[in-house]
Image (cartoon, grey):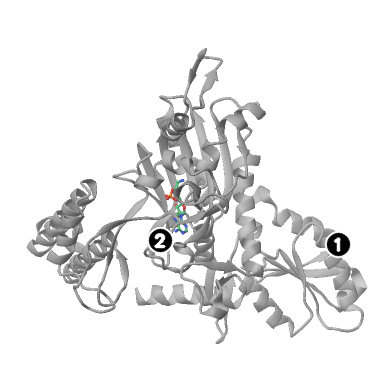
């Protein structure tokens, strides 16, 4: 675990050192859980967006994209259920004045019990060697079964308290478990209360509650309220989808783990409208499609798994997460939700506008059901960075840090170097640079020796480096070096553009 913590720390500092991610307002000591993207980060983020947009919109004739506003009519959030149900249970420690999510405190307590179980298992595994049967040990060892039973009881009590909104019992649970504040060490807690995660602000020209606006906590509602507009302005027929990428805001109580949980973040969401009754078929379809999208990037097939929700959100009848193996363990990267007709029906009721589709084949009108795919762009950024960050031992006492980014995502695709700053080499290298940069993001570099220049490009994930040397002036050839293998080949200058375009092509990941 300590080793994984170190890897994560290295990734965070690498992200800063090489201009990927900075803390927001850093000169004022930062703002909690808000981050800015630097020059390389902005490029990587744009490339992830492009990969999603191309795969979802460009490659699907039955999906169209929109870009709706962050501010929406306040009734939107009443209809969607966010005003009443988008809450986390909150508790404050009176001594440290620190605020916690009550459910997270209990989950962390459960995790400690799990760690004790794991310790017993590890000990037994060591003792019994190959003959060890973990399932049998879990089922029969009295210490383990007692602890498992303890976990089940805590989980059941927490679930009942959440379902019944019995906040007094939630507090009693925290007290019974003797959970102490990690900062003050005291057990001096306030009552548990519900905390709405939406940020709000005020319209300038309307006073009081009437003028209260929310910063959207999901981009999905911008799609639902535009359902008719899109239907009437395109030739789409059910089943069809509407996609968008945009900012979302959540006043998270527990905001940590770098860009994993932020207060301002970006989502890439798609709502797929289907015939009522066909939602299970499409839910299964999109679950597999989205996993394929992830795996096509080559970040390691073993780094993904599905996690079915036992208790889907208020709008869904079925939901799962695609989890990714982050440096701090498997965690949610993307959600696939079967949202039923909940949202359109709610908007229909509150707006008084019919949000229905006339199905020419069935000759009837209905409110379509919806399958949603929803991925956090920043979380995808972190997943990419974590999977691609490598500290490689090159033997002979040397090492290098390399970001093994898929070429389509790399901020810089090709770096062009003259071997030296004289003999007409810079002029030749600039010629190639000028020819390439129309089609691909390139960098021209002449400072430092070639080895240092390679290392700098490795650290930001540049897949190809082209070097112009004295032989270039004789036979019009250059070397092209591949980042991961570090192998070099000589190709003619005429081929450079074709080779670079082909190797960095979207066709490598999109089919
Ligand atoms: N429209 C459905 C929806 O918003 P969600 O599971 O709450 O569902 C979807 O969020 C995705 O948005 C998550 O899988 C995650 O990738 C991302 N996400 C949610 N909250 C986030 C936060 N505070 N910071 C960064 N990403 C977040």
Structural crowding at the residue carrying mark 1, measured as other residues with C-alpha within 10 Å and reported as few (<14), some (14–19) or many (≥20): few
Q: In which quadrant will I find the N terminus?
A: bottom left
Structural crowding at the residue carrying mark 2, measured as other residues with C-alpha within 10 Å and reported as few (<14), some (14–19) or many (≥20): many
Element marked by disc 2: loop
Q: Nearer the viewer, residue 191 or 118?
A: 191
The tag on residue 252 is 2
Q: Position of 139 compared to 327: left or right? A: left
Q: Quadrant of residue 358?
A: top right
Q: Residue 444 placed where, x, y %? A: 79, 73
Is any part of residue 24 visible from this angle?
A: yes
Q: Residue 385 placed where, x, y %? A: 53, 65
Q: Residue 375 placed where, x, y %? A: 49, 50
Task: Answer whether labels 2 and 1 touch (C-beta < 8 Å).
Answer: no
Element marked by disc 1: helix
Is any part of residue 394 visible from this angle?
A: no
Given the current orientation, which residue lies at the most extreme top position? 363
Q: Which residue is mark 1?
A: 435
Q: Position of 102 compared to 303: left or right? A: left
> Which of the marked residues, 2 or 1, is nearer the chain's N terminus?
2
Q: Position of 178 compared to 440: left or right? A: left
The response on whether ligand 1 sits within 8 Å of label 2 is yes
Q: Residue at x 51, y 24 (%)?
A: 356
Of tags 2 and 1, the one toward the viewer is 2
The tag on residue 106 is none
Q: In which quadrant will I find the C terminus?
A: top right
Q: Nearer the viewer, residue 211 or 500?
A: 211
Q: Residue 290 placed where, x, y %? A: 50, 44
Q: CA distance from mark 2 to mark 1?
A: 47 Å
- Examine the rendered structure and indicate whether residue 129 appears above or below residue 231: below
């Amino acid at each position: 675990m300590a080793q994984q913590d170190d890897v994560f720390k290295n990734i965070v500092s690498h992200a800063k050192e090489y201009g990927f991610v900075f803390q927001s307002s850093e000169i004022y000591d930062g703002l909690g859980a808000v981050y800015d993207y630097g020059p390389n980060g902005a490029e990587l983020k744009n490339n992830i967006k492009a990969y999603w947009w191309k795969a979802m919109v460009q490659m699907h004739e039955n999906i169209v994209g929109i870009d709706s506003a962050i501010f929406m009519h306040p009734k939107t959030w009443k209809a969607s259920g966010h005003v009443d149900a988008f809450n986390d249970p909150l508790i404050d420690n009176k001594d440290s004045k620190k605020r916690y999510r009550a459910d997270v405190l209990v989950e962390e307590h459960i995790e400690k019990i799990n760690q004790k179980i794991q310790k017993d298992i590890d000990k037994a595994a060591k003792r019994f060697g190959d003959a060890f049967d973990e399932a049998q040990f879990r089922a029969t060892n009295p210490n383990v079964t007692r602890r498992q039973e303890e976990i089940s009881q805590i989980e059941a009590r927490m679930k009942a308290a959440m379902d019944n909104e019995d906040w007094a019992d939630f507090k009693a649970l925290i007290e019974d478990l003797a959970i102490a504040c990690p900062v003050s060490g005291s057990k001096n807690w306030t009552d548990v209360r519900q905390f709405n995660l939406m940020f709000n602000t005020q319209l300038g020209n309307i006073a009081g509650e009437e003028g209260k606006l929310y910063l959207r906590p999901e981009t999905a509602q911008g799609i639902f309220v535009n359902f008719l507009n899109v239907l009437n302005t395109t030739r789409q027929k059910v089943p069809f989808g509407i996609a968008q990428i945009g900012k979302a805001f959540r006043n998270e109580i527990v905001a940590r783990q770098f860009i994993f949980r932020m207060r301002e973040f970006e989502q890439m969401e798609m709502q797929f409208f289907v015939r009522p009754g066909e939602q299970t078929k499409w839910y299964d379809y999109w679950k597999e499609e989205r996993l394929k999208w992830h795996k096509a990037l080559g970040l390691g097939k073993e780094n993904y798994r599905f996690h079915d929700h036992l208790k889907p959100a208020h709008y869904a009848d079925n939901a799962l997460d695609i989890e990714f193996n982050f440096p701090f363990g498997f965690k949610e990267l993307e959600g696939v939700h079967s949202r039923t007709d909940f949202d359109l029906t709610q908007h229909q009721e509150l707006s008084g506008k019919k949000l229905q589709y006339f199905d020419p084949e069935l000759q009837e009108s209905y409110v379509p059901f919806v399958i949603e795919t929803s991925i956090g762009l920043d979380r995808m950024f972190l997943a990419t960075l974590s999977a691609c960050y490598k500290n490689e031992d090159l033997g002979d006492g040397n090492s290098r840090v390399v970001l093994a980014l898929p070429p389509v995502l790399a901020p810089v695709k090709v770096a062009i170097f003259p071997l030296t700053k004289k003999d007409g080499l810079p002029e030749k290298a600039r010629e190639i640079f000028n020819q390439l940069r129309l089609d691909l993001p390139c960098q021209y570099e002449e400072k430092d020796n070639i080895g240092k220049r390679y290392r700098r490009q490795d650290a930001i994930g540049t897949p190809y480096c082209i070097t112009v040397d004295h032989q270039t002036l004789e036979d019009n050839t250059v070397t092209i070096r591949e980042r991961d293998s570090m192998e070099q080949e000589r190709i003619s200058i005429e081929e450079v553009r074709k080779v670079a375009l082909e190797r960095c092509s979207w066709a490598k990941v999109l089919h």
